[in-house]
Image: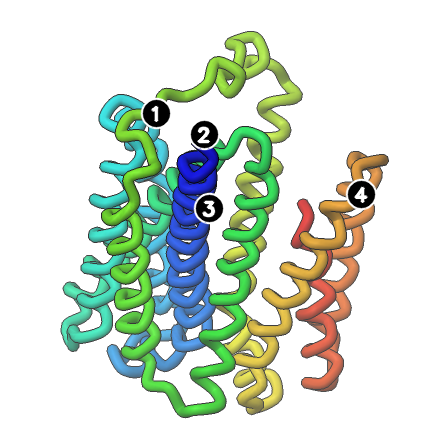
Amino acid sequence: MQDTGIKDRMNKKKYLDRKILFSCLLHFSIGFEMGGFQTVLRTMAEFFSLERIDSGFLVSAQYVGIILMPALIGRIADRVGKKRTLVVFMLVFSIGAFMVGVSSWLGITVLGLLFIGSGYGVAESVSTALLGDHYKENADRYINLSQAFLCIGAVAAPLVSSLTFFLWRWVFLSSSAVCLVSLVLLLSETGFTKVMHTSDALLLDKSLIQSNLFRLFFITMLLYVGMENGFGYVVETYFYDSFRSSWGAYAISLYWSAMALSRLLSSTVSSNLYVQLKIRFIAITLVYVVLVLSPSPVLSLILCALIGFSYGPI
């Protein structure tokens, strides 16, 4: 009986390690693509002979998938099972990243970015929900860990690109490869139940959804997410246009590093959250103003880190 108990605990530990490793690798691949795409956007625009304003079309193609697909798939994932949904959309992400990594046609690249966004949006949200469903007591710890790996990926891609003259295509091919490795771990994992339904505790009451407070929160988060993610896509171009500097990649890495650090620090603070939010939004606004007026790439580098630090916990 004692041997059986030890064996069960070892199996549980093995499943725990594999599940968390899968989630961390998945989020790393997503972060690597995100940070890398922000770094190489200008290079991609030049490759396809796009005007500056047209390069935003590439970003929009990815974010259409990120925004729309989770909303369309959420209820389906609960019916067919989160694991099955993950397998499909991790493949979608990997295929999309591979398409962007090998294609020289703008149309195929845009379609690939749409695939990336669709896979990214669903895989990130469903994998987070899956951890929450499976690890009731320690969900926060494991979700924060996986989000930390997303930030690590977003930090690593710009550094690798700048330090090794990484070709822009390899940003996407590397993301595709890491996602496939995490997919293999997911497929080999039998610990996740095939079908997991949303807990009643997570279902929102209709009166709450219809309240002004919820609408205000929704609009605030819509604006905030656009600001947080959108900022990274203009940083590299900002440094090049303003200072003819190649420090944009380092600024993106500092931005995500500071964000990860502030998330870690804020997780230990549970009081005066509303006051913290107001302070951070005010701080972000002031730092943006200084960034616009900045005469120095060094000062701008510091300001990018401060913006990331302020964004992190929101």
Q: Regarding mark 3 in the picture, which secondary structure is present there?
A: helix
Which quadrant: the C terminus? top right
* Labels 4 and 3 touching (C-beta < 8 A): no
Contact, mark 1 vs mark 2 (Cβ under 8 Å): yes
- Residue behind mark 4: 269
The kind of residue on which mark 3 rests is Lys
Report helix, strand or loop for mark 1.
loop
- Where does the image place residue 174, in percent across and percent down from the top left? 31, 72
Q: Amino acid at mark 2?
A: Asp
Name the residue: 15% across, 64% down.
108
Residue type, label 4:
Val
Horizontal side, residue 106 vs residue 183: left or right: left
Which mark is in front, 4 or 3? 3
- Label placed on residue 133: 2
Q: Earlier in the sequence, mark 2 or mark 4?
A: 2
Q: Is residue 125 above or below residue 306?
A: above
Residue drawn at x 71%, y 57% as measured from the top left:
262
Question: Do the residues bearing badges 2 and 4 touch, measured as CB atoms within 8 Å?
Answer: no
Disc 3 packing (10 Å; few <14; some 14–19; many ≥20): few
Picture quarter containing residue 21? bottom left
